[in-house]
Amino acid sequence: MRTRSATRHPGRTRDTVSSLLGVYLNDHLAGSTTGTERARHMVRSYRGTALAAAMGPIAAEIAEDRASLIGIMKRLDIPVRHYKVYAGRVAERVGRLKSNGRLVRRSPLSPLLELEMLRLGVEGKTAAWETLRELAATEERLDPQLLDDLRARARRQQSRLEELRGRQVGAAFLER
């Protein structure tokens, strides 16, 4: 007996699947835009610190990954939904307005929360690369090696962000 998830969905055409993939990838593009903007903002905000130096290469990679996603969407003939890109930029800027317990200067919590947000975003990006890698088995326009490379880089980013996050725990809560 086949489970519901193992059965083909009646009425699901190639166009429907392409439409769903378009929604999925545009949603990830919005998230990627948010992450790219946040990583760049962190490099600017912490200029001259060890955190900015560590974030510089990560921010560059996150921007490259966003460009790779756009390239994949082009190869799949999936149009970029610009309103979602703008929504990602707006979300990042609104995130800067959060209350952090300080009115004038940055809270020691700011870098910790920013790193946690970026780490979550990179986890989502990793999942997207894994989804596309699974689809590469039947979609010849997807490059399995590129997706493997992107997934491996995302995992390295997660590891580096987690290391930086751990350091910020000490800076936010333990150092006086």
Image: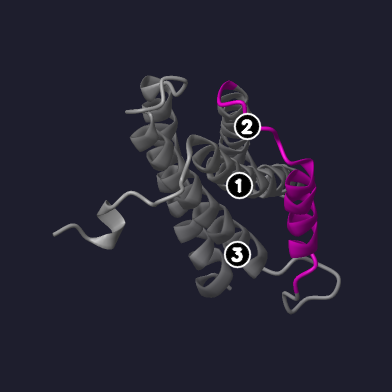
- Provide the secondary structure element on which disc 2 rests: loop
Residue hosting label 2? 78
For the residues labelled 1 and 3, the Cα–Cα distance comes to 28 Å
Q: Residue furthest left?
A: 1
Q: Residue furthest bottom?
A: 101
Q: Residues within 10 Å of mark 2 (few under 14, many from 20)?
A: some
Magenta residues (range): 75-98
User: Amino acid under label 1?
Assistant: Val
Pick the front one: 162 or 131: 131
Q: Main secondary structure of the magenta part?
A: helix
Q: Can residue 131 be seen in this snapshot? A: yes
Residue hosting label 3? 113
For the residues labelled 3 and 2, the Cα–Cα distance comes to 33 Å
Q: Is residue 119 above or below residue 139?
A: below
Pick the front one: 36 or 130: 130
Can residue 22 be found in the magenta stretch?
A: no
Residue hosting label 1? 23
User: Amino acid under label 2?
Assistant: Ile
Residue found 72% across the figure and 51% down from its top: 88
Q: Position of residue 39 (x, y in %)?
A: 65, 45
